[in-house]
Structure formats: structure tokens, C-alpha cells
Amino acid sequence: MQEYRKILVPVDGSKEAELALKKATQVAIRNHATIDVLNVLDTRQFVGAYGGMLTSDVIYQITADSENYLNELKDQMLATGLAAEQIKIHIRFGDPKTVIAFDFLKDYAEDLIIIGSTGLNAVERLLVGSVSSYVTRNALTDVIVVRTDLDNHPLPANPAK
């Protein structure tokens, strides 16, 4: 039986990613594993959103918002019974696809990625491609894509958001 000791869960604020985190928490409890919760701040989005004016104040605020979000998720995980030493939170800048599939794994040697099916609507997937699809095809470790709720019922269809 495969035992996973180090689980990576990328989160982006979407319901799908947070459901993947809930499922990963259950896996970590059963396997006495650690979870690395990762929020990748896509630097390509900043250029258009801030007109190329990415000041240190903007970077600080974006990072602080991400850290607050990750700490909220950590509190939820602690409430479900995971121990504090089993949870690590991380913020990275870059292309989420390559950071998740390659860069983070090289630094932390995860043995499993649990990722939400998609945090994008159909148009966004067409333009930037699905991160989960890319990670599934290219990751340097096992990947579980969460497509069901905590009771293993299929998630409702995701209409354009």
C-alpha cells in the first residue's frame, strides 16, 4: 500500500482548491503526513492588472493578503484535527503551472499533489490552460485531481463564473 508522507496542495481561492485541501487534510490525518499549502501568485497577471506599475507596496499588499488567506486555511485544518507541525504554508511568485509541477517539488520532495479540478471558467481555461491539466501531465510525482465532494459525490457542473 502506498503511503504518502509529504502532500502538496496548491490553492488559489477557488472552491475546487479548498475542497482539494479538505480531502488532503483527511489523507494527511490517515497517513500521519505533512501538508504543504501553496499559493502561487501569478506574476503575469500583475503586469496587466497594475499597468506595469508593480511597486514594493503592491507586492507587499498582495503577499500579505495571500498570507492571511493561507493562515485562515491553516486554522480550518487545525480545527479538523491536523497538528500544527503537519501544516506548512508557502507563497511563491511565478507561473503556477511550472511552480507546482516542477520548482516546488524540487525544493521540497513531495510524494503527492492533491489539486482541485479547476479554478477557472471555460474562457480562462481556453486562454491560459488548466493548471490542473498541466500538473497532471507533467508533475514529477503522483497527482490526485479532486472531482468529488467530501462524500465522493460528483461536483456540480461549473458554469462560467
Image: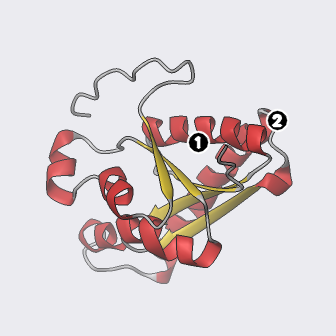
- Residue 53 coordinates in the image, percent (x, y): 32, 80
Nearest the eye: 85 or 75: 85
Which amino acid is tagged 1? Leu
Circles 1 and 2 in contact, beta carbons < 8 Å: no
Nearest the eye: 108 or 87: 108
The numbered disc on residue 81 is 2
- Residue 88 coordinates in the image, percent (x, y): 72, 60
Residue 36 sits above or below residue 157 on the image? below
Residue 139 in sight from this viewpoint: yes
Residue 148 sits above or below residue 50 on the image? above
- Residue 110 coordinates in the image, percent (x, y): 61, 64
Residue 42 in sight from this viewpoint: no
Residue 98 as seen in the image, left or right of residue 71:
left
Which amino acid is tagged 2? Gly
Residue position for label 1: 21
Q: Residue at x 25, y 74 (%)?
A: 51
Earlier sequence position, callout 1 versus callout 2:
1
Crowding at mark 1 (Cα within 10 Å: few <14, some 14-19, many 20+): many
Furthest-front residue in this view: 1
Q: Residue at x 30, y 66 (%)?
A: 45
Q: Quadrant of residue 145?
A: top left
On the rendered image, what quadrant is the C terminus found in? top left
SS at badge 1: helix
On the rendered image, what quadrant is the N terminus found in? top right
Q: CA distance from mark 1 to mark 2?
A: 14 Å
Crowding at mark 2 (Cα within 10 Å: few <14, some 14-19, many 20+): few
Residue 28 as seen in the image, left or right of residue 98:
right
Label count reads 2
